[in-house]
Image (cartoon, rainbow, N blue to C red):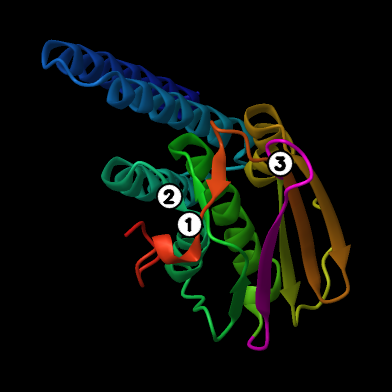
Amino acid sequence: MAEGSDIAARMVRLEADNTRLRRLLDEAGAPDGLRHGLRDTMAMLRAVLRLSAETADSVENYATHLEGRLDAIARVRVTADTFGEVNLHTVISDELMIHLIREGEQAALDGPAVRLRPKAAQLVALAVHELCSNAVEHGAFGLAEGGVEVRWSVDGATPAGELTLVWKETGGAGIGPPARQGFGMQVLTEMLSYELGAKVDLAFEADGLRCTVRFPLTPRVGHVVDETDFEENGEPG
């Protein structure tokens, strides 16, 4: 009961903060885009709080994972507020770095320059965060020789184009499907599908997890850009 009361109290405080922020933005005459972005972010935060509570098997598990999930969303929101869009490479590399997985060492990233709209970027960041956390706790990142290859491509055959992203862990000892559907599985199998129209395939291979995500690059999701449009730090020039 205490845990349920605590979650309910958090939800009430979050909704109250959301209402105050909307009122302040309206009074300040903030642009529609900013207000819309705030609504999307707050809705996602509410969903994360609720699903984290529903899928956690203990208060300790809930507290341990919630902060990382909220941070993943917040980092993308800051970048989106600055640039309007977020570089897919940056989303992935930032999440890996939070888990001390460095590109060129334990991680290899490769794919065209893709900019994601704020909501799509937050969802992808949350998915990558869950993949990283799972690899640390159960997969390849828990082993000295473990690593990950993340590669993505865009098929331009359809009007919008379809992005295919493959997360492939290497050097692992092999893991099986989880005994229960936790928060990470819900993000991968439900949230991405509902919000982005994504199709997700999970394969539990001998050396680690392979996760393949496909979704259309519609205007509200993102688009491919010329490599020269980016500065060295991966953000728009």
- Badge 1 vs badge 2, beta-carbon distance below 8 Å: yes
Q: Check disc 1 and report its element: helix, strand or loop.
A: helix
**Amino acid bearing label 1:** Val
Lower sequence index among marks 1 and 2: 2
Quadrant for residue 110, please give it: bottom right
**Residue 11 image position (x, y, % from top left):** 40, 22
**Amino acid bearing label 3:** Phe
Residue most extreme to the left: 28
Report the residue marked by disc 2. Answer: 86
187, 38: nearer the viewer: 38
Q: Which mark is residue 91?
A: 1
Q: Which residues are magenta?
A: 144-161
Quadrant for residue 2, please give it: top left
Dot 3, crowdedness within 10 Å: few (<14), some or many (≥20)? many
Question: Does residue 217 sit above or below 144 in this rendering?
Answer: above
Residue occupying image coordinates x 66% and y 82% = 143
Residue occupying image coordinates x 53% and y 39% = 120
Residue occupying image coordinates x 64% and y 60% = 134
Q: Check disc 2 and report its element: helix, strand or loop.
A: strand
Q: Which mark is residue 215?
A: 3
Lower sequence index among marks 1 and 3: 1
